[in-house]
Amino acid sequence: KNPHYCVRVTANDGARGDQFLRDFQDNEKTIPTILTTSQKLSTGVDARNIRYIVLMRPVNSMIEFKQIIGRGTRLFDGKEFFTILDFVNAYKHFNDPEWDGEPIDETSEKTDGPLVPESINDGEKGGCPPVDPPEKRKKIKIKLRDGKEREIQHMISTSFWSADGKPISSEEFLQNLYGKLPALFKSEAELRQIWSNPTTRKAFLQRIAELGYGKEELENLQRVIDAEESDLFDVLAYIAFAIQPITRSERVNESQSEILKGLNDKEIEFVEFVLSKYVESGVDELDEEKLPKLLNLKYHAIADAQEKLGDVVKIRTVFFGFQKALYSKHKNLTSKL
């Protein structure tokens, strides 16, 4: 019965359409549930809970097809698959040998011999043959315009796209991003200041997404530089200033004494709960919009949270305050970099 259950979002819909798109991306909201669009969901949109993709217009471009299908591949709690309803035979684009390569024949030759090692059957030599340890991830070094090298994984199934929709290499993507970052921050200290405040961090992420580097692209970059357990802050600092990433767990451990300074026992309990979610899932858990959900998870009701922590203003002050300490530059943290 909600008039916004299904809405249209196109470039012609302006600010109203953009708001519908933001609401659709917000996993805390259920309205709008269905978006109809021509191009808006083809690239650069971070909507993790897309369950259905319905194709009702011809998609002639292989690249655009992959970008559209890519919207459904994001993971979300309770989402293990997504469904494509194809009314225009676009599925033929899945048949792309240049993308997937030729199929590999993994069928081994048939043998009439025993399937277990001979040394086990003959009763003379026990145990199994030695197994080679798993091969370490291969990395290559690339040099950016500052003359310093960055390491990226050599073989990883992640694709990057240029602004005009063409596939580009990880190295080219890094070079392009490196060229954009000076317009967003001039120093590590400025990036740290932006990142330590949920409001300025959110505005920064929106701005960088408008430049073509949305959350999905940054998370892909995390995988490329082997920093999936790190904060997106560390990814950006690594690209911009060649500062080695640390894990979220290391950041919390090194900053903990500063984080908890001045907090009472009930505030400490809440902050430690939030930090556990941060270590587990990443910086999204520190977004101001996540605060009500975190309070409900911890205390089962906002009223109960206020009884223990104080009013909304006080809770917000604690939530913002510990993040400033989390991203402060500490001696122990600096020595690891």
Image: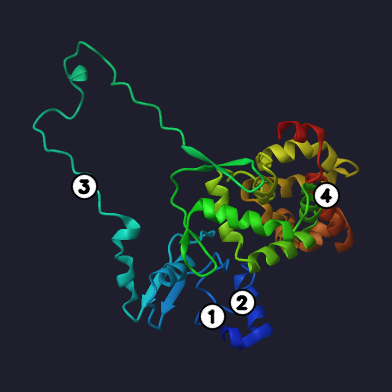
- The picture places residue 101, in percent across and down from the top left corner, at 30, 54
Query: Which residue is situated farthest in the right direction here?
Result: 262
Quarter of image, res 107: top left
Circle 4 sits on which residue?
A: 324
For the residue carrying disc 3, how many other residues have a C-alpha within 10 Å: few (<14), some (14-19), or many (20+)? few
Q: Amino acid at mark 1?
A: Leu
Q: Position of residue 103 (x, y in %)?
A: 25, 53
Element type where label 1 sits in the image: strand
**x, y percentage for residue 54?**
42, 78
**Is the C terminus in the top left, top right, bottom left or bottom right quadrant?**
top right
Find residue 243 and report its horizontal and vertical position in percent. 69, 41
C-alpha span from label 3 to label 4: 54 Å
Quadrant occupied by the N terminus: bottom right
Badge 4 local density, few (<14 within 10 Å), some, or many (20+)? some
Q: Nearer the viewer, mark 1 or mark 3?
A: 3
Residue closest to the eye, 72 or 182: 182
In the rendered image, which residue does mark 3 sit on?
A: 105
- Please tell me which of labels 1 and 3 falls first in the chain: 1
Check disc 4 and report its element: helix, strand or loop: helix
Residue denoted by label 1 = 35
Q: Which residue is mark 2?
A: 21
Q: 23 and 273: which one is in front?
A: 23
- Work out whether residue 53 can be spotted: yes
